[in-house]
Amino acid sequence: MLQVEVVSPEAITYSGEATMVVARTVGGGDIAFQAGHVPFIGVLEVWSAKVIGTDGSDEFAVHSGFIQMANDKVTILSDVSESKDEIDVDRARAAQSKASAAVAADDTDVEAIGALKRANARIAVATGEASH
Amino acid sequence: MAGAKERVLRRRIASVNSTKKITRAMELIAATRVVKAMQRAKEAKPYATQITSVIENLSAGGAAASHPLLREPEEVKRVGIIAIAGDRGLAGPYNAGVIRAAERQLNAARTEGADYALILCGKKTNDYFTFQGYDIATTYTGMSDSPTYENAREVAGEVMRMFTDGEIDRVELVYTEFVSMGTQKVTVRRFLPLESTDTVAAEGGGDSSALAAFEFEPSAGGVLESLLPRYVEARLFGAMLEAAASEHANRQRAMKAATDNAEELKVKLSREMNRVRQEAITTEIMEIVSGAEALGSD
């Protein structure tokens, strides 16, 4: 079993056990951890992180952060992480269309690109599209 | 007829009493806030610990330490001073302590022949340094009561920008450390440049698991690059939370002292008033008696 903790700067937002954790790292694509994985530190992409337990799974939209795996303990450090229930899909869709329009108008707009990524991650988590 | 003196005293007692009610209310508010602030400071600890532990592992993994935030300047031309204190007064020596320590840092920088840049959090520090005619780089207000991570990110972002742009070559952080409910200590810490990752790791106290060789993605250097700014933010956030807890603890103590003093003053004034009133009554009786006697003897 894996010990999983999701830690934000303000508090520990999630803590539990899992058989597998799936996340996406910058430049590395999706990566899955199971017990006995080699020690690993990665920078997380703005995407989902899925914690799969023996009875069901929890999924989070993480807005960048880090993942550390050591001694069967997975720690996700993220400034902002939202669980599936916290996500407002309609709002995320609105943000997505607004941000994609902004990116279409100016593809160097870093803020709009970030907003689009976040909206995509939220929608993916909420609708289950990100099921790896 | 109540004497003029008695009336004056009665009015003063009423005024002391209403002041006491206010200070008592402030004491109770501060008491609940200090508990909440302590709780938040405690909840923020795991993140800081974890991030330090990641740095430890990176350092053990041999991450190249050539990040702009680690730059040790050859010559310090300008020292940044971050002073974290409150927006409001009535907190005993809380604001004055931070202001004094910051001013000492400023004078130390001047004796070294360096310029200074003041980065102030809290209205009170701003008031003081403006009044004294110092040059203020930036001021942040409205975050001292219960700082959020967003606040810390905003301040840290500006400080890191100034540092990486070479506007400042060293940054000192002045804040009040929350040791316990009874003790808060004004502390000066080196904020930037960061000590090398090895030193961070050695002083870290995170739960190191640096025995095994880590794999990094994208690379050890890449992870470090995105990690260090977060580390700086987390450190500032921790300081802000401790400062907030200290502010409330100081205010609670100051207001308790004020309430006690008001109570004491009230007792003293009541005694005085009673004495004056008794005197007036005695005099009045004496007058009546002697008047009656004068009439009766006719």
Image: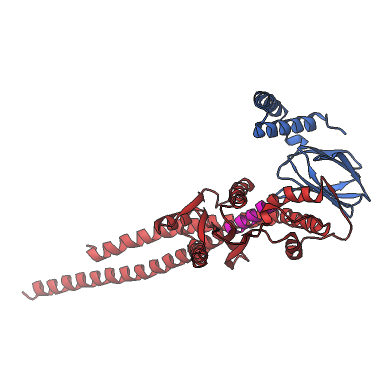
Chain colours: A blue, B red
- Measured as percent of width and height from the top left, residue B10 is found at 31, 62
Count the marks.
0
Which quadrant of the view contains residue B38?
A: bottom right
**What residue occupies the far right of the structure in this picture?**
A36
Q: Is residue B137 above or below residue B2?
A: above
Does the magenta run of residues contain B148? no
Between A119 and B108, the one nearer to me in the picture: B108
Between B198 and B257, the one nearer to me in the picture: B198
Q: Is residue B28 above or below residue A34?
A: below
**What residue occupies the far left of the structure in this picture?**
B298
| Residue A120 visible, this angle | yes
Which quadrant of the view contains residue B242?
A: bottom right
Residue drawn at point x = 69 percent, y = 25 percent: A100
Question: As drawn, is B91 to the left or to the right of B154?
Answer: left
Between B16 and B92, the one nearer to me in the picture: B92
Most common SS among magenta residues: helix
- Measured as percent of width and height from the top left, residue B21 is found at 44, 57
Residue drawn at point x = 49 percent, y = 61 percent: B95
- Measured as percent of width and height from the top left, residue B32 is found at 58, 55
Does the magenta run of residues contain B242? yes
Residue drawn at point x = 67 percent, y = 59 percent: B194
Q: Quadrant of the C terminus of chain B?
A: bottom left
Q: Please provide the residue range marked out in magenta.
A: B231-243
Q: Quadrant of the N terminus of chain B?
A: bottom left
- Measured as percent of width and height from the top left, residue A2 is found at 89, 49
Q: Is residue B270 above or below residue B197?
A: below
**What residue occupies the far front of the structure in this picture?**
B74
Which quadrant of the view contains residue B79?
A: bottom right
| Residue B21 visible, this angle | no
